[in-house]
């Protein structure tokens, strides 16, 4: 055999060893990223669901306002019944801290899902 064919034989053996170690190490790392991002996504989603009620008006406020108007009408006090807004939800708005916290929660969920997507792509590659 000549020197070139020996060189390429040694090169192929060393490259296969290196590639095998590389794939083994990074496959384990991607598994860890997948597990972590899955757990983080589940926890983040549960917080988002729990905070979702702060982004919409309380339906019992509308019910209470309508009942209050019915009581005023029943008592014959038409001026008081007409002065209250019919739908309190029309004057309701979410608080600034609630909106910011929701934005951060959705951003963290998005980043976690993006990390999981990247790990899946890396494992399939």
Image (spheres, grey):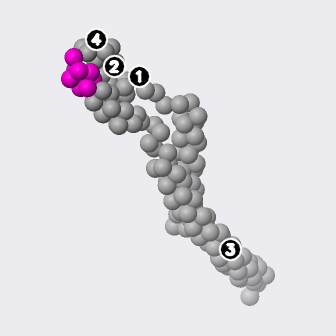
Magenta-colored span? 69-76
Would you say the residues marked 2 and 3 are in contact, meaning their CB atoms lie under 8 Å apart? no
Q: CA distance from mark 1 to mark 2?
A: 9 Å
Whether residue 79 is situated above or below residue 18 in the rendered picture: above
| Residue 73 falls within the magenta-colored stretch | yes
Q: CA distance from mark 2 to mark 3?
A: 65 Å
Q: Which mark is residue 28?
A: none
Mark 4 is surrounded, within 10 Å at the Cα level, by few (under 14), some (14 to 19) or many (20 or more) other residues, namely few
Q: Element under label 1?
A: helix
Mark 1 is surrounded, within 10 Å at the Cα level, by few (under 14), some (14 to 19) or many (20 or more) other residues, namely few
Q: Nearer the viewer, residue 63 or 1?
A: 63
Would you say the residues marked 2 and 4 are in contact, meaning their CB atoms lie under 8 Å apart? no
Upstream in sequence: badge 1 or badge 2: 2
Q: Residue at x 28, y 17 (%)?
A: 81
Residue linked to disc 1 = 91
Whether residue 2 is situated above or below residue 97 in the rendered picture: below
Where is residue 5 drawn, in percent x and y?
72, 81
Q: Residue at x 74, y 88 (%)?
A: 1
Q: CA distance from mark 3 to mark 1?
A: 57 Å
Q: Element under label 3?
A: helix
Q: Which mark is residue 25?
A: 3
Where is residue 22 drawn, in percent x and y?
69, 73
Q: Is residue 116 left or right of residue 65?
A: right
Residue linked to disc 4 = 79
User: Residue 4, can we see it?
Assistant: yes
| Residue 121 falls within the magenta-colored stretch | no
Residue linked to disc 2 = 85
Q: Residue at x 63, y 73 (%)?
A: 28
Mark 2 is surrounded, within 10 Å at the Cα level, by few (under 14), some (14 to 19) or many (20 or more) other residues, namely some
């Amino acid at each position: 055999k000549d020197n070139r064919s020996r060189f390429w034989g040694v090169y192929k053996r060393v490259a296969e060893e290196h590639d095998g170690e590389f794939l083994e190490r990074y496959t384990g790392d991607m598994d860890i990223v997948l597990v972590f991002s899955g757990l983080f996504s589940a926890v983040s989603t549960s917080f988002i669901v729990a905070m979702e009620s702060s982004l919409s008006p309380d339906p019992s406020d509308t019910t209470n306002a309508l009942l209050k108007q019915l009581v005023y009408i029943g008592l014959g006090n038409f001026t008081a019944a007409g002065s209250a807004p019919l739908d309190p939800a029309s004057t309701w708005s979410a608080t600034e801290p609630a909106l910011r916290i929701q934005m951060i929660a959705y951003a963290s969920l998005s980043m976690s899902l993006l990390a999981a997507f990247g790990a899946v792509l890396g494992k399939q590659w």
